[in-house]
Image (tube, grey):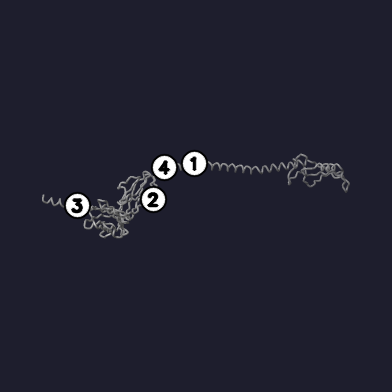
Amino acid sequence: MGNLIPLILLACVAHVLNSQMQLNPRTITLLRGDTARLICSTAEPWQVMVWILNGGSLLTISAQYGILSNNPNVNAINCSTNQLSSWEFTLNRVQRSYQGQVTCDLQNIQRQTADLFVQERGNVAITGGNVTVLKGEEILFQCLAVGWYPEPSLTWLVNGREVDQGQYNISTEGPVDVDGLYNLTSNLSIQAAESSHVECLASVSALPTPQASSVRLTVVAEVVVENVCDDCAVLIAVTASVSTVLLLLLLSICIVLCYLRRRAKSSLPEAIRIDESKSGRSSVAEATGGEVNLGYTTEGHSDAGRSDLIVTGETHSQMNSISTHKIPDVVSSSNFSLTTSQSNAPTDHCGDGSKTVRRMTTV
């Protein structure tokens, strides 16, 4: 009982002391480049307030004269009320080197400290871009998260649903430089079942929303591929059939044209002979008044019956054969009359004064 009373008194004294001032927030996490804001409040009268970063004084405020120091990177605003004296301290464009403790010191009263954490936002990207695969194939996606601090959390989403961690792995490289930044690589392997929206998310606690990279997975169904192949086969078959028909038709036309040409060539000599025969006969017919000499033979053949001339005389009884002369095919009527008259008229021969009668038979 005797030991309990001192403990209760100590707790009451600590509560009274703590109630003398408040610093909010006690923990602050920011991204590099953001602005840190803290509020120091007290209901007790005070004279001097000093803001300290990692042991170094940044700003001094007098209750009577206000801000005493001049630092362009820090500022303070008086937010006091009738019951409470409050000042808001701002630290602009925080850097990784600012990470540590920020202290509000009410001199001769109390001091409190808040923890400041500065994080780094890097980049995230899925390599390879959009992908088109056949249904049922295994597809591998790779995500790179580069330049983060601290090590970011990385997750995958497919059509807005988070992927189980057993389906992907994460390898970490870092810190890689003096800033202590981290690089991450993650590989996701899935079986292509349907067209999907694939996302890779990287985040640190200071980010209000994760940084994301997304690609489109297009899945081509096998049945569609088979239908396309069937259509191609049908098209090829139809094209081959039409080509064959056209080729046969062209071949038939060529055969018919060749046949007609050969037939025309074979009938041409016969037509020429017929024309020549007709022209020859017509010339003979014109010369003989329409009668054709059927006893005509070509040169080289002789007919003794037609070629011999018989000469008769009163004093000479023998028959002298005279050399064969070609009998013309056509004998005009004038020649014929002349010959006839000559044959009927007596002919005087010098010498013995005998008369010779020449007879010519015209066939």
Closer to the camera: disc 2 or disc 3? 3
The 10 Å Cα crowd at callout 4, few under 14, some 14 to 19, many 20 or more, is: few
Sequence-wise, the earlier of marks 2 and 1 is 2
Per the image, the residue denoted by label 4 is 224
Report which residue position mark 1 lands on. Answer: 238
Read off the residue under disc 2.
129
Q: Which mark is residue 72?
A: none
Q: Secondary structure at mark 3?
A: helix
Name the residue tied to disc 3: 16
- Foreground: disc 4 or disc 1: 4
Which type of secondary structure does the marked residue at label 2 adopt? loop
Q: Which is in the foreground here, disc 4 or disc 3?
A: 3
How many residues crowd mark 2 within 10 Å: few (<14), some (14–19), many (20+)? few
Of the image marks 1 and 3, the number of the one nearer the N terminus? 3
Query: What distance separates the C-alpha of mark 1 from that of mark 3?
Result: 99 Å
Q: Who comes first in sequence, dot 4 or dot 1?
A: 4
Q: Position of residue 156 (x, y in %)?
A: 33, 48
Q: Left or right of 236: which side holds 322?
A: right
